[in-house]
């Protein structure tokens, strides 16, 4: 009896590598095919995209139907670390001509037996995926990342996960669905063989694939991953607000202010606040035309409707900088320091002396009167 027990144990141990070796295999699931709405519809239904905006679903899948047959690098159905990758030529193929603001990513779920941790990543790149190896390589920039735990409740669905990233105009986009290492449950993302406008890629070092390769290259040409990105083009609106109270002569010396009434567009998605996000405002520049008999005695300050002040220039320009009327332009985009202006005509623009517009007024309401406060402590000037 002991010998039989020993032989049985030995046989069991020898079969372990055959049963649980890491190989590219499909789920083995047969039966239900799941039909889904168009790319982006799950994100809209989940409220991950503003209902009043114009979301764009970016996908290479010709169909969102989940069909059994997805392949992963796995051991007995338990996935090792796998990267499922989609590359999107936003300007060339999708006609995106502005920055593209990502709000959500989507993926299909063919099979899952319990919680499995994923990491969803959005990258920008200037070239094809072949230039980004080993992935992710130096030629790609990670712009957004979020974790997600896929579970049995997601079975047969297109999952939408909020993710924020902005792809700069002219760049291409890479979406990576990373199955994290350490999984203890099975998971197969959703795919079909209904066609795709660009190949699906997989990278799995445990199966010897250390750079992204197509599913066709590993023997599974009909595995077309369902991976969508939802977002919208960022349209920049430039508005100029001017004071109606100019020109203003002053004599004797006095501190004065002139307002510019500012209002938001009132359109859907317009927050009416200063910031760097969608629907938020950036102060492009503050420009004033000014003449003074002694530039070094002039202090210029910007005050917001909420009362926050930012010194643009304080005592710069020396004795002669404003002898002749000149435009003073202040912008966060400038690399010129106004404190280095010791005389003569001013440069084309300056960075605000007291700090950036963006940081000083971040989160403030733009609506109301913005004041340019000019203080000339010595003599005659004209604004």
Image (cartoon, rainbow, N blue to C red):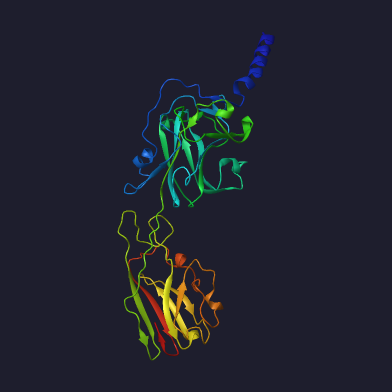
Task: From this view, report whether residue 246 is shown above or below residue 283.
Answer: below
Q: Measured from the top left, where is residue 159 in percent x and y?
A: 42, 36
Q: Residue at x 56, y 41 (%)?
A: 129
Count every numbered label the image shows and give the total.
0
Along the line of sight, the residue nearer the viewer: 257 or 221? 221
What quarter of the picture does the C terminus occupy? bottom left
Q: Residue at x 35, y 47 (%)?
A: 54
Q: Measured from the top left, where is residue 134 in percent x and y?
A: 63, 41
Residue at the left extreme, as displayed? 266
Along the line of sight, the residue nearer the viewer: 299 or 216? 216
Task: From this view, report whether residue 176 is shown above or below residue 222.
Answer: below
Q: Measured from the top left, where is residue 146 in percent x and y?
A: 49, 44
Task: From this view, report whether residue 119 is shown above or below residue 332.
Answer: above
What quarter of the picture does the N terminus occupy? top right
Q: Residue at x 39, y 27 (%)?
A: 34
Q: Is residue 326 left or right of residue 13?
A: left
Task: From this view, report whether residue 16 is shown above or below residue 209.
Answer: above
Which quarter of the figure has residue 279?
bottom left
Q: Measured from the top left, where is residue 333 in percent x and y?
A: 50, 66
Residue at the top extreme, as displayed? 1
Along the line of sight, the residue nearer the viewer: 40 or 323? 323
């Amino acid at each position: 009896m002991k010998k039989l027990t020993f032989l049985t144990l030995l046989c069991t141990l020898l079969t372990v590598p055959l049963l649980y070796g890491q190989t590219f295999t499909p789920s083995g699931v047969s039966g239900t095919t799941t039909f889904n709405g168009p790319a982006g519809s799950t994100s809209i239904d989940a409220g991950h995209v503003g209902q009043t905006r114009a979301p764009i679903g970016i996908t290479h899948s010709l169909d969102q139907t989940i069909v059994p047959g997805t392949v992963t690098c796995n051991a007995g159905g338990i996935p090792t670390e796998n990267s499922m990758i989609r590359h999107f030529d936003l300007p060339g193929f999708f006609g995106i001509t502005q920055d593209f603001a990502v709000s959500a990513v989507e993926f299909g779920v063919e099979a899952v037996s319990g919680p499995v941790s994923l990491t969803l990543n959005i990258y920008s790149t200037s070239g094809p995926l072949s230039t980004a190896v080993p992935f992710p390589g130096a030629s790609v920039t990670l712009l957004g990342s979020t974790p997600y735990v896929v579970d049995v409740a997601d079975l047969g669905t297109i999952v939408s996960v909020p993710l924020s990233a902005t792809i700069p105009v002219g760049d291409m986009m890479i979406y990576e669905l990373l199955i994290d290492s350490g999984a203890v449950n099975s998971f197969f993302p959703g795919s079909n063989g209904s066609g795709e406008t660009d190949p699906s890629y997989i990278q799995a070092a445990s199966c010897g694939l250390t750079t992204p390769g197509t599913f066709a290259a590993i023997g599974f040409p009909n595995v077309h991953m369902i991976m969508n990105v939802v977002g919208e083009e960022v349209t920049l609106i430039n508005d100029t607000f001017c004071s109606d109270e100019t020109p203003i002569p002053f004599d004797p010396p006095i501190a004065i202010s002139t307002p510019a009434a500012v209002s938001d567009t009132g359109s859907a998605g317009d927050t009416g606040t200063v910031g760097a996000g969608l629907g938020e405002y950036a102060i492009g520049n503050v420009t004033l035309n000014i003449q003074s008999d002694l530039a070094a005695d002039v202090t210029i300050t910007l005050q917001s409707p909420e009362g926050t002040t930012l010194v643009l220039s304080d005592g710069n320009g020396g004795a002669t900088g404003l002898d002749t009327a000149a435009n003073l332009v202040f912008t966060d985009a400038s690399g010129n320091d106004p404190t280095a202006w010791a005389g003569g005509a001013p440069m084309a623009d300056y960075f605000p002396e007291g700090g950036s517009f963006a940081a000083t007024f971040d989160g403030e309401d733009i609506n109301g009167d913005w004041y340019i406060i000019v203080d000339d402590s010595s003599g005659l000037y004209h604004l």
